[in-house]
Amino acid sequence: MRLSEIARRLECELRGGDAEISRVMGIEKAGPGDLTFIANRKYVHYLKTTRASAVILGLEVSDVKIPSLRTANPYLAFARAIEFFYRPPAPSPGIDPTAVIHSTSRIGANASIGAHVVVQQETEVGNDVTLYPNCTLYPHVRIGDGCMLHSNVVVREYVQIGKRCVIQNGAVIGGDGFGFAPVGDGTYHKIVQSGTVVLEDDVEVGANSTIDRAAVGETRIRCGAKIDNLVQIGHGSDVGENTVLAAQVGIAGSTVVGKNVMLGGQVGAAGHLRIGDRVVATAQTGIPNSVEEGKIVSGYPAIDNIDWRKASAVFPTLPQMQKRIRELEKLVAELRRKSSEP
Amino acid sequence: MRLSEIARRLECELRGGDAEISRVMGIEKAGPGDLTFIANRKYVHYLKTTRASAVILGLEVSDVKIPSLRTANPYLAFARAIEFFYRPPAPSPGIDPTAVIHSTSRIGANASIGAHVVVQQETEVGNDVTLYPNCTLYPHVRIGDGCMLHSNVVVREYVQIGKRCVIQNGAVIGGDGFGFAPVGDGTYHKIVQSGTVVLEDDVEVGANSTIDRAAVGETRIRCGAKIDNLVQIGHGSDVGENTVLAAQVGIAGSTVVGKNVMLGGQVGAAGHLRIGDRVVATAQTGIPNSVEEGKIVSGYPAIDNIDWRKASAVFPTLPQMQKRIRELEKLVAELRRKSSEP
Amino acid sequence: MRLSEIARRLECELRGGDAEISRVMGIEKAGPGDLTFIANRKYVHYLKTTRASAVILGLEVSDVKIPSLRTANPYLAFARAIEFFYRPPAPSPGIDPTAVIHSTSRIGANASIGAHVVVQQETEVGNDVTLYPNCTLYPHVRIGDGCMLHSNVVVREYVQIGKRCVIQNGAVIGGDGFGFAPVGDGTYHKIVQSGTVVLEDDVEVGANSTIDRAAVGETRIRCGAKIDNLVQIGHGSDVGENTVLAAQVGIAGSTVVGKNVMLGGQVGAAGHLRIGDRVVATAQTGIPNSVEEGKIVSGYPAIDNIDWRKASAVFPTLPQMQKRIRELEKLVAELRRKSSEP
C-alpha cells in the first residue's frame, strides 16, 4: 500500500516523499518497506538509525530524514495502520459438529461455534459471536452480539456478557466468590454464591483472569473496561467505565473502582473500598484504604506518588541516617557535659 | 418465606414484626422483600437508610427500625439464609455420551460427568461426584465422594482428592513442580517430579490456581483448607487444616504452613519455611523466614504487624527526617566551634 | 537397585557399604530402602537422625554413618537418580478418535494426540510430540519435535514452538497482548496484535502462565529458559537463554531480559527495560528501570540487594529514629539557648 494512501485513510499529514509499505513494525526492527512509529519518548533516538521506509510521528517532533505521517495521536494511528496489513485468521463459520449445545439454548446468526464447545441449558448466544474450541457456557448465560470468546473460556451460570466483549483464553467469568463463614470450631461453612457477574459492552478480559460471581447481587465490569491477564476480581466488586487493570492485579471483594482508573501490574486493593475516578496506582502498589478521585498513588501502604518517590529515594540511606543520629547523640552529650562544667 | 420461619430455621431471635422475604441481598442494594445482614462494622450506618424488609444482626447491636434476626454469628446466619432462596442449577445426571472414560477406570454412583470430560486409565471417581465439561483426569487419580470439579479442571497422574472437595474452573492439581538442576554449563536438567499431590477432605481450590506435584513425596493440602483464585502452591509444600489462602498467594516449595493460618492477597512465602499455626499475614506480605505460631506479620521482609504499621506511618516523612538530621549537624557543628573558642 | 549400581551410573564415589534402594525420598521422610540427598544446608542436621539407607552428598561434607554417594553436584545426581525409579505414565500412542484435526494440518510420526484435542488449519506438529487431552492449537502453528503439551494448553495463531519444549496445563501461548490506544474521549481502540510468539528449544512453561503475542514483531523465549506457574510475559518481550522465572513473575511489554537471569517469585518488571545477563532479583522485587548485568537487586523500587537488606533492617526502627531526632532537636535548642546567654 502506498504511504500516501495510508496518510489519506488515517487522515495524517504526509511529510517527505511517498513509499510502498508492506508492514507495520517496531522501530528497533523495522527495515525497508516497513512503516514504524514513535509513541514513547524512549525510542526517539532510534529515528537517527532506523532503516524503516516511513514513520508515524506527533506533530511536534522536528523534521526527520525519512517520510513521516503526522498526527496528534500517533499511537492511535499506529493501531489503525496495523489493520491495513494484518487480520487474524477468520474463525470457521457455523457450528462445529462436535460442539454440544443444549436444545433449550439459542445461538444467533453468523455465529462461529468451535469444536468441543459446550453450551448448557437456557443460554442465549447473540449474533456474530465467536466461541473458540473448548469453551464452556454454563446454564442461563447471556452472550451479547459480536463477542469473541477464545478457547478454554468458562462462563458460569447466569452470567451476562454485553456486546463486542473479547475474552482471552482460559479466563473464568463467574467462578464462585471466596466466601466462607467461620462456624466457630475452626472450620468454615461455604457461602453459596447466589449472585452473578455482569460484563457490560466492549469489555476485554485477559487470559486466565478470574472474575468471581457475587455472594448476593452482582460483580459488574462496566463499559469499555480493559482487564489484562491473570487478574483477580473479587465477588461483588464493581469496575468502572474505561478503567484499565494491568496484569496480575488483584481486587478483593465489594470494592468499587471508578471510571478511567489505571492500576499498574500486580497492584492489590483490599475489599470494601472506593477507588475514585481517574485514580492511577503504579505497579505493585498495595491499596488498603479508599482513594480519592484523581490521585496518583504508590507503595504499600499506598501514599501519594510524589511522596513515595521522595521517601523511596531516601530509603537506601537509612543505615547512614542511623549512624548520623548516633554520632549526633554522642556530640550533643559531650556538649552538654562541657556546658554543665563550671 | 416468612421471616419467622427463617428465624426458626436459623435459630435466631426475631425482634420486630414478621415479614415476607423472597431474597437475601447486601445492605446497599436491598429493597422491599429482601433480608439483609451486617457482619462488617463499615456497613452499620446503612441501617438508617436501608429499604430492606429485615436484617440479620449481632446480639449486641442496638434496636433498629426494621425487623431483625439476632444471633451470635450473623455472618453464618447470612450464609445459611442464602441457601433457602438460591440453589445453583443442578448438573445433568449421568455420563455425557461425549465423555471419554478409559475402560480401566471406575465412576461411582450418582455421578454427573459432563460433556467432553476425559478420564484416563486406572482412575477412580467416587459417588456423588460432579465433573463439569472439559475436565481432564490423568491416570491413577482418586476422587473422593461428593467432590465437585468445575469445567477445565485438570487433575494430574496419581493425585488423590478427598471427600467433598470443590475445585473451581481451570485449577491445575498436580502439575510438575518447578525443579531444574544446574548442569554446570548454564543449562538445566529437568527433575522428574515423581511425587504427587494429596488434597484431604473439604478442601476448596479457586479458579486457575495451581498446586504442584512434589519432586519426591507429596504436596499436601489438609482438611478444610480454603484456597482462593490464582494461588500457587510449590512442590512438596504442606498447607494445614482450615488454613485460608487469599487470591494470588504464592508459596514456594517445601514450606509447611500450619493450621488456621490466614494469608492475605498476593502474600508470598519463600521455600523451606515453617509458618506456625494461626499466623496471619496481611496482603502483599513477603515472608522470607519461618514465622512463629500466632504472629501477625506484614511488610517485606515480614515483621510484626504493629511494628510495620508504625514504621510505615513514618516512612513518608523520610525526606523531612533527612533534612532535620542535616540541620542538626549544622547546629551541632556551630555549637562545637563556639564551645572550643577560648 | 543396588547402591553400587546407582553409584556407577551416576559416576559418584560410593563411601560406606552397599544397600538395596527402591526409591528416592526427601531426608525428612526417608526410611529404609530410600536414597536421600542434601543439596541445601538447611537440611544437614537431618543427617544425624535420618532413617534413609543412603544419601547423596557433596564431596566436602564430612563422613556420615550411612552409605553415601559423593559428587561435586549432588542436586544433579539426585535429579538423575529419580529417573531410575519413576517414570510418569506413558501417553496413549496415536491420535484419539475424538481429536479434531484440520485436513490441512500435519501430525508427525510417533505423536500422541489426546482426546478432544483441536488442531486448526495449516498447523504442523513435529515427531514424537504429545498433545494431552483438550489442548487447542490455533491456525498456522508450528510445534517442534519432542514437545509435550499438557492438557488445556492453548497455542494461538502463528506461534512457533521449538524442540523438546514442555508446556504445563492451562498455559496460554500467544494470547493477545494488552494494547489499547486512547481515542481521546476516554475510550480505547484495541490494537490488533499482529505479531506472534516464538519459543525456542528446551523451554519449559508452567501451568496457567500466559505469554502474549506481540503487537508487531514477536515475543521471544530463548533456548532453555524455564518459566514457572502463573507467570505473565507481556507482548514484545524477549526472555534470554537459560533464564529462570519463578512463579507469579510479571514482565510488562517490550522488556529484554538477558541470559541466565533469575527472577524470584512475584517479581515484577516494567515495560521497555533491559535486564542484563545473570541479574538476580529476589522475590517480590519491583523493577522500574533497566538493570546492569550481574547485579543482585531487591525491594521496590529495586536497589542493590546488600543496600536493601541493610536498609530493611533499619526500617522497623523508624519510629525510634524519629523520636531520637526529636530529642536531639530539643537538646540542641537548649544548648543554643545556653550558649547565647551572656
Image (spheres, coloured by chain):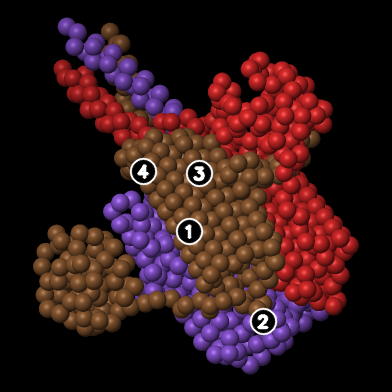
Chain colours: A brown, B red, C purple
Instruction: Estimate the spatial distance between the alpha carbons at disc 3 and disc 2, rounded to whole Å.
Output: 40 Å
**Residue at the disc numbered 2:** C99
- Residues at marks 1 and 2 touching, judged by CB atoms closer than 8 Å: no
Along the line of sight, which residue is nearer the eye, A52 or A118? Answer: A118
Nearer-the-camera pick, A261 or A325 = A261
Q: Residue C96: name its quadrant.
A: bottom right
Question: To which residue does mark 1 refer?
Answer: A163
Between label 1 and label 2, give the one nearer the viewer: 1
Q: Amino acid at mark 3?
A: Asp
Label of residue B212 in the image: none
Contact between labelled residues 1 and 4, with CB atoms less than 8 Å apart = no
In 3D space, how far apart are the residues under numbered discs 3 and 4 (Cα atoms)? 15 Å
- Does any portion of residue B202 appear in the rendered image? yes
Residue corresponding to mark 3? A238
Tell which subunit mark 2 falls on: C
Residue count near mark 4 (Cα–Cα under 10 Å), binned few <14, some 14–19, many ≥20: many
Residue type of the residue flagged with mark 2: Ala
Q: Is residue C12 left or right of residue B129?
A: left
Q: Amino acid at mark 1?
A: Lys
**Residue holding disc 4:** A278
Q: Label 1, label 2: how many angstroms apart (C-alpha)?
A: 32 Å
Q: Which residue lies at the image location 40% right of the left edge and 50% below the top edge?
A: A242
Q: CA distance from mark 4 to mark 1?
A: 24 Å
Q: Earlier in the sequence, mark 3 or mark 1?
A: 1
Q: Amino acid at mark 4?
A: Arg
